[in-house]
Image: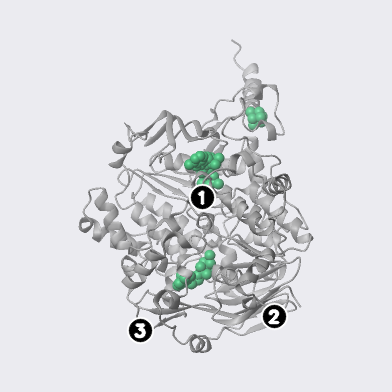
Amino acid sequence: MSVKIDNLQIYYTTLRGEVKAVDGVTFSIGDGEIMGLAGESGCGKSTLGNGLIYLEGRMRHAGGHVTLDGKELPIGDAKAMEQHRLRSVSIIPQYAMSALNPTRKIGRMTADLLKSRGVDYKSVLEEFRRRVALVGLPADVLERYPFELSGGMRQRATMVISTLLNPSLLIGDEVTSALDVSTQRAVGEMFMEFRDRGYVKSTIVITHDLSILAQIADTILIMYAGKLAEKADAQTIVNNPLHPYTQQLLASLPEVGLRYDEAPLVGIPGRPPSLLDPPKGCRFRDRCPVAFEQCTAEPPFVELHPGHQVACWKAIQDAQSFNEEPAAQGAGR
Amino acid sequence: MSMLEIDKVSKVYKTGTFGGDVMLALRGVSFDIGQGEVVSLIGQSGSGKSTLGKILLRLLEPSGGVVRFDGRDITSWSKHQRRDYYRYVQGVFQDPFSSYNPLYKADRVFEMVRGVYYPSSSRAEWEAKLEDALESVSLNPADVLNKFPHQLSGGQQQRLLIARALLLEVKLLIADEIISMLDASTRVDVLNLLVDLKKKGLGVLFITHDLSLGNYISDRTVILRYGATVEMGETHKVFGNPQHPYTKSLLTAVPQLHKKWESNGALVTTGPLARSGATAQFEADPILAEADADPRRYSRSAIHPRQQARAEASDGPKLSLMDRRDVPWHQRFGVRGPDYAAVIAANPPPVMVECEPGHFVAQSA
Ligand SMILES: Nc1ncnc2c1ncn2[C@@H]1O[C@H](COP(=O)(O)OP(=O)(O)OP(=O)(O)O)[C@@H](O)[C@H]1O
Ligand SMILES: Nc1ncnc2c1ncn2[C@@H]1O[C@H](COP(=O)(O)OP(=O)(O)O)[C@@H](O)[C@H]1O
Ligand code: SF4
Ligand SMILES: [Mg+2]
Ligand SMILES: [Mg+2]
């Protein structure tokens, strides 16, 4: 397991109190695994992704551990993290497109970035050029300013730059969301290619486009209101989700060819709880069609089937009754 | 007469790319949007969608052609009449972050609306109105008010901007990728909200990369490529019976939950990253191919890129509401532009033919 996250908590300090954006999450990502991360807007995906790289001013590592390649990643210690960024963990942030410094050419910007990590640009230039060509960017992008590139080209460029030092973990936050379908496909396939070539070991792809995850992700992790809801391999999440939130999320996707006047889609009624002072128990309870008494306690995130973890009392109950029946007839204890 | 008429609109950008080129970002685009009509605008990144959106919002001047709103050329609204224009026509942009001034709290965008358009409303009236608008985009006021933009998630920023547009009596909404930052269920809420508003007469230009959402909501669809229309018409005809090879290729690239990309056949002949061999190279990558084949770049004698960069830098954060690239270059450099009219005339868009009633396709050259 190259990435292990254990009961991680990342809070934002605000005047009104702490926003518990990532509130005790535990999961791991294997070598070569591309893990999709999806969930309601505002549920803490970017916080989780950013938190593994850089805690900005108001972000606080409130608890838990991150282990990368068997060693603790000191996410709460900005100084100690410096040597890990880009080398062992790397992120393409949600606003990569606008984040690129407009006054620096791509090559120059990369050189600056590497220098800040103590790496000599010249020593990686050849590999940089090779990868630029590999992803289909013209050789002269190094001489161009970010604003001279199309959105798709910019995403490819950021992806090449952020993986140049072969990090163990790459995080892409909404990398494909502003792209047209064919560029999405090209960028999506880049994630697989980079993994296959060993440029990165594990990958987290944050996106709202579940259909893209169905194409490129090995596993999908669904978050809800700062907690984990469900994790399983991509096909299982898509075909056989167990958490009611995942089920309803998938049900709100339009099928190709549907129109509002023929078959109106319905979202999930209600809103997620505020993360300032989240309620006890299951955070999906107010919106859950199958909630019952037990749901006032917090459901544990448990493995109900091999490789399939869920945090839901109903799912736990169903799995138990399923397991108990045949067992009752079998070997009597 | 339609509410909005886009009449042979062209746009030429000056770019520093190859030492001062000219980019013809839009080539004679024409279509209209009626009251209560949703028109989807679809095309590859760089095809000119946002450019058109910005022209409609008067953030950019067209280099050729006219846009009329209620029969009136939109450039004829004088500076202080702009306010009236924006009462009716509002936009929400692709990258929500760039629409905020990072130095101010995000809800300042609402206060600005109040100051300009509802100066006499009481605090209570205003708050009720605001709460409604937030409610309709599934936002919890406590989560979003009184926060700085960077303290909001991407989807929250996006929804605040939609809510702001709803505070006005908008007749036309320019929605540039407004749902890409939202999860599936919030997308549905926002789409259904647009459907409700459409039934009350709102016209929407719905710029999207998501063809199934475009299909779900729009009455008509316009497909843009290299700045020109290649196919347009009633949505069910364009999607149900696509004629142009480009439209067809877009439809095969749509990611689907239950079907792998490969099974749709290679969109790109060798695959975006050729799958085998260490010397893999893009061959027929759409974007790369496009960069070469793109008919819109013209060499022009130069502005030195460094000069351009300096200008970029000095524009600084003042222009946070606008893309800094959009400052007309003669303003930035104090020089007059090249002969735009000649560039436009030399590159006419393909001719559109009606292949069935209400369905137009570009004639291949
Ligand atoms: N700097 C901050 N200070 C206070 N609260 C914050 C800050 N950044 C984010 N938040 C809050 O933390 C929560 C999680 O935000 P995050 O950006 O992680 O969401 P997300 O899942 O990435 O959403 P989206 O899909 O919309 O991008 C949100 O409620 C957001 O308002
Ligand atoms: N201010 C600008 N200066 C120069 N080129 C620009 C500017 N804005 C956009 N472009 C170029 O014009 C083309 C169309 O851009 P845009 O309208 O943003 O496309 P889309 O929204 O369809 O992705 C692209 O090639 C882009 O690089
Ligand atoms: S734990 Fe209870 S409320 Fe939560 S999702 Fe499961 S059934 Fe619904
Ligand atoms: Mg986010
Ligand atoms: Mg755009």
B170 vs B51: above or below:
above
Residue B153: % across, % down: 53, 46
Marker disc for residue B301 = 3
Q: Earlier in the sequence, mark 1 or mark 3?
A: 1
Counting residues from the start of the chain, the first of labels 1 and 2 encountered is 1
**Disc 1 sits on a residue from what chain?**
B
Secondary structure found at label 3: loop
Q: Which residue is mark 1?
A: B104
Spot occupied by residue A95 in the image (x, y as percentages of width and height): 46, 53
Location of residue B231 with respect to B279 vertically, above or below: below
Which mark's residue is nearer the viewer, 1 or 2? 1
Q: Chain of mark 3?
A: B
State whether residue B350 is above or below residue A91: below
* Residue picked out by circle 2: B355
Pointer 2 local density, CA inside 10 Å: few below 14, some 14–19, many at least 20: few
Q: Are marks 1 and 2 in contact (CB under 8 Å)?
A: no
Front position in the image: B36 or A159: B36
Q: CA distance from mark 1 to mark 3?
A: 41 Å
The kind of residue tagged 3 is: Ser
